[in-house]
Amino acid sequence: MLELKSVSKSFGSKAAVKDVSLAIPVGSMVGIIGRSGAGKSTLLRLINRLCDPTEGKILWRGQPISELKGAKLNQWRARCGMVFQQFNLSPRLDVLTNVLIGSLARQRGLGPLFKVFPIEERARAILELHSIDMEEVALQRCSTLSGGQQQRVAIARTLMQSPEIILADEPIASLDPANSQNVMETLAGINRDRGITVLVNLHALDIARRFCARIIGMNDGQIVFDGPPDALNAAVIDRIYGRQFVENITENPSQMEVKDTLEAVA
Amino acid sequence: MTTINPYLNLSRQDLIAKAIAIAPKLVSIPISRRLLNYGVWVLAALAFALLCKNVDMTPAVFAKGFKNLLRFFGGMFPPEAAGQEIRILSALAATFAMAVSGTFLAIFGAIPLGLLGAKTLVKQPLAHFLIRRFYDVFRAIPALVWALILIVAYGLGPFAGVVALAFADIPRLAKLYAEAIENCDPKPQDGILAAGGERVAILRFGLVPEVLPVMASQSLYVLESNFRHAAILGIVGAGGIGFELEERIRIFAFDQVAWIVIAYVICVMLLDTISEKIRSHLIHG
Amino acid sequence: MLQNMIKTDENKAKFVAEFEARRKIVVMKHRAAQISIVLILGLILGVSFYTSGFFITNYGTDPMSRIGDLLNKMIPDLEPQNLLKGRSQSGSIASWFYDMPTWLSLLSQTVQIALVATIFGSVLGFFASLLASKNLSPLPWLHWSSRRVLEIIRTLPDLIVALILVAAFGVGPLPGVIAIALGTTASLGKLFSEANETIDWRPVEAVKAVGGGWWTQIRFGVIPQVLPNYASYALMRLEINVGAAAALGVVGAGGIGIELSRAITYTEFDTYLALLILIVGLIFIIDIASEAVRHHLIGLKLAR
């Protein structure tokens, strides 16, 4: 169980996350939706501890992780995989090395600093690449891959960590529809086959409805909805995205999908 | 539900065997390539060791030198001018004055040469190439080398130092000026041409306002480096702070050396800061 | 109607007069600024030339003829018919470059001094740059203080440092290596840290999110991005260092410089010219080689 207890985070005077409390059972796939700037990203970064909460507690399987420091913090980050919107790969390193980066927290000694990894880690990296059909490009530089391929490499890197939970921060926001579909299916497959808890930030409502059994809606740093996709009605969507947004949809073709969903709901 | 990793429960052998079945070449790097990799590193390390040995970088020489160096450092505290503050400070002033004078002479010499070296003014490619290579040849000669020979011509004293700095900087500045002129935005010049301007007018109103700040900033940059070069020239007899330093190092008066070095560093950092301020003002307006 | 026209004409005249008055003030302010800049510059120059003793140095009669004389002495007495004969034959090129084996070995020592110093300087500069770059430095005060230390080292001329080191280590190439390595560390430390500060932070964040420590973040997040820049800066520094190493011998710190000062002491001016040609040739070759490699590196960077 991942538990957040009245977690708040502010940058200077601006509050990004306000008094969020959550309980997410192990093995679930949860979609977090909301407008950009609603605090979704900050929420995931708080869980991975890329930033520290101003107030509140975060627990994983009963163990408090919001106070970890130093080596303990690195161990937690290793158990908690992170997938980024911009993939965050090292463009000049080859695919295999980028995947091996996922095993860094396990490595001891100076070997990794010279890009020398144990043979079983190499073997695992290749198996992970194989599971996403990418072993053929293993020795190519990451910068030569397409966006969708890069995001799958980033997922393979996360899997190398043997994570217990994966946090995906807008994983498909920079991808075309076909690749988005592919990446989301990969994430769902990981959740289904390996039982890894997945938290995924999305701004496209229909994708969230399709892949996630539970949806959390955020607006202005607060949780305004938490429930199954079926419970998303017009009033709820209005609360998440704001009246302004819903009215603007008709003028903005990129947000048509939300409108379609709205109509379907209505 | 518990977390399952399909590869975690596999034994090491199974893991490797499975991966080899998929991509044999990726898992274990062939011995030949590994040897080549290590071989390159070993060769590089050997070459480096040989280089170190050739330049006397051996533990024995190091140990001896460091013992002396520590003794010198011990002697540096407390820094002490031994009543020669005036003399040292005026030598410092003379050094900086040498740098300013030398740079000024160099600017004068470099302006026509810079124009001559710019592709926009001398369009013939071969001539341009030869002129720039000519500057490169003279750029390779350090000020100290000029000073050695100029002191023979003009005797001990700052005159030779000033001329040496100027000689060393003329080709450097000429190259920088030529590049500034080449990189200058041609649009204002086109504008004047379109308005029916003469060649002189194009230079005066199109080129000069564009390149003058850049050239001034590069001259200041050369001035900054000359604060350092001027200090060196004293060692070969051009007077100034270098001479004072050398004299005191020779008699192991390290408390005075420390005093001079501290005074010098403070002055240079101050002058650098001023010059940097002016430079950024020139470039960003 | 007419009344109105006169009125507007009056207005126009008034407007023009006002404009002219304001323009005059602006122009005068501009002039005043220009004149004061010229005055200040003139003052600085006057004081500088006076203080440096430029005018009072006693260099005999005519500076131009003196340098002419010297140039004359520097040109060797080559005889066309003996040009390609052996070393013992005066007037041959071989007799002009009479000590070629020694000079070549000193030139090679010069290059070796520069190489070793550049390698050590680059490695130390890399570590210094990690402390000195704002985004990587583990502690804020460390970033500030390491920057100041690098600045202070940069103000010290390498020959002055070499002079002190020669006193400690004795005559030989090692003091030269240390002196140049120190200067290289300081200048590359600054350049590297500037490169570090322009990196894309995302790959670093990814390594952090994976649970990698500080060193692994540097190794897999930072270094792949900055390595081409580092290499090109280090090569540029190598070019500078060959020149510096050529001069070092003057204070006894190894390299070809020792022959330069010997030639001057024994008034062998034609030898001085021969050495100069060798040094310039060496620096030229190094420059061209390093430039070729640097262009290749830039190509690599653009290709990614």
Image (tube, grey):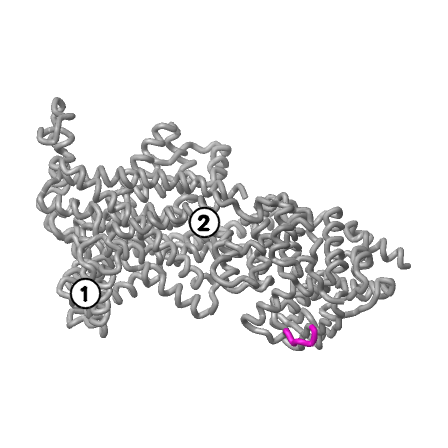
**Callout 1 touching callout 2 (CB < 8 Å):** no
Q: Main secondary structure of the magenta part?
A: loop
**Disc 2 target residue:** C229
Crowding near the residue tagged with mark 2, few <14, some 14–19, many ≥20 C-alpha atoms within 10 Å:
some
Query: Which disc is residue B88 wearing?
Result: 1
**Could you tell me which chain the residue with mark 2 belongs to?**
C
Q: Is residue B14 above or below residue A221?
A: above
Between C245 and A103, the residue placed more toward the observer is A103
Give the residue drawn at x 73%, y 68%: A220
Q: Position of residue C163 (x, y in %)?
A: 20, 58
- At label 1, the amino acid type is Ile
Residue bounds of the magenta highlight: A61-65
- Judge from the rendering whether residue B153 lies leftward or rightward of residue A28; answer left or right: left
Between C282 and B243, the residue placed more toward the observer is C282
Between A121 and B175, the residue placed more toward the observer is A121
- At label 2, the amino acid type is Asn
Query: Which of the image's four quarters has the N terminus of chain A?
Result: bottom right
Query: Which disc is residue A172 wearing?
Result: none
Q: Position of residue B18 (x, y in %)?
A: 65, 50
> Residue A60, located in which quarter of the rendered image?
bottom right
Give the residue drawn at x 16%, y 45%: C259
Mark 2 residue element? helix
Q: Is residue C136 above or below residue B128?
A: below
**Could you tell me which chain the residue with mark 1 belongs to?**
B
Give the residue drawn at x 13%, y 43%: C263
Crowding near the residue tagged with mark 1, few <14, some 14–19, many ≥20 C-alpha atoms within 10 Å:
many
Query: Which of the image's four quarters has the C terminus of chain A?
Result: bottom right
Q: Position of residue B10 (x, y in %)?
A: 65, 58
Q: How far is mark 1 from mark 2, CA to CA? A: 42 Å
Residue C133 visible in image: yes
Q: Position of residue C174 (x, y in %)?
A: 24, 55
